[in-house]
Amino acid sequence: MKRLSLAAALALATIPIAGAQAQATYPDRQISMIVPFAAGGPTDIIARIVGEHMGKTLGQSIIVENVAGAGGTTGITRAAQSRPDGYTIMMGHMGTHGAAPALYPNIKYDPAKDFTPIGLAAGTPILIVTKKAFPAKTLKEFVDYVKANGTKVNEAHAGVGSVSHTSCTLLHSIIGTKTARVTYRGTGPALNDLVGGQVDYGCDQIVNLVSQINAGNITALAIATPERSPALPNVPTTKEAGLPDYQVSAWNAVFAPKTLPADVTAKLVGALDKALDDEGTRKRLLELGSVIPDKAGRSPAALQKLVESEVARWTPVLKAAMAAEQAAGEKK
Ligand code: ASP
């Protein structure tokens, strides 16, 4: 008994010291950033750009791990359940941390409670884009065309609850239409098929669209923000194109599992902040059309607030839109 309690006392005495040492040397090995979509999409691209610079600051590489499926909720669930030691972080977005809870009744994480917010990485305006050979060339023509052709038209999206899925769901709830929906593991592969002409259109984050639009491989009908994007000055806003009610912007942000130690959190927050101040990183993000958050907008507290307001914003909109979509499908 006496020996046991001595051992227990020794163990108790050493645990906090070991923990403190581990954190003081954080990070002493590479960090994994889970991207819940396929490589080559907006979330992946932003994670790689921002992660590269964060890794330099931290003195360890940040390796992107693509864990796709279920609109991003598969990867985020895995990341949320990993050890809160700073070696597994994730790039979430408006879908995984705003829209998904409305659409997955059995989702295993609460966006507002199960994460340590690190900070917003980029704002990403949404565009409506079509394949090059699509018959409609303006947003007005698009609306008429989908009204006339319904489910003969195919939308490419990154899974239920993803940004692309959510943004097109909102579009159709505004114009009162329903098209066929094709699921991809991310909008990187979806964009490949849009360029190849296998699918008709999508509503996605600006980031990987700019170069394909400028090369004339796909057509941008409108950008759903109040102002045009400096990265795409020739693309009209939805207001200019005749659909002013369609306003939607997404975002990508870095999160860690909940209960991340404060000093590890501070190192990650500092590294993200530095990355977003770095000229080279900023240039790459801006060229892709991202909107870089200001100092206040990139704080963990601002991200926590954003998550809470996005869940509150999207839940009623998506529940109503999905019910209407189902009713429209049942009528046919
Ligand atoms: N843009 C994506 C979405 O629609 C996913 C991705 O980044 O590939 O949610």
Image (cartoon, helix red, strand yellow):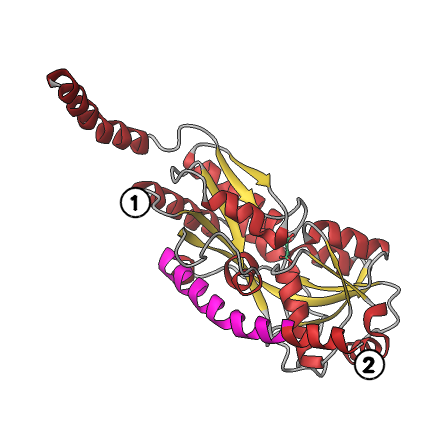
Looking at the image, tell me whether mark 1 or mark 2 is earlier in sequence order: 2
Q: Which mark is residue 262?
A: 1
Question: Between 210 and 327, which is closer to the camera in this rendering?
Answer: 327
Question: Between 170 and 252, which is closer to the camera in this rendering?
Answer: 170
Identified at 58% across, 72% down, the residue is 319
Report the predominant secondary structure element of the magenta stretch.
helix
Residue 230 visible here = no
Residue at the far top in the pictured view: 3
As drawn, 306 above or below 259: below
- On whether residue 305 falls in the magenta region, the answer is yes
Residue at the far left in the pictured view: 2
- On whether residue 93 falls in the magenta region, the answer is no
Residue holding disc 2: 144
Identified at 75% across, 73% down, the residue is 329
- Quarter of the image that includes the C terminus: bottom right
Kind of residue sitting beneath label 2: Asp
Question: Between 92 and 12, which is closer to the camera in this rendering?
Answer: 12
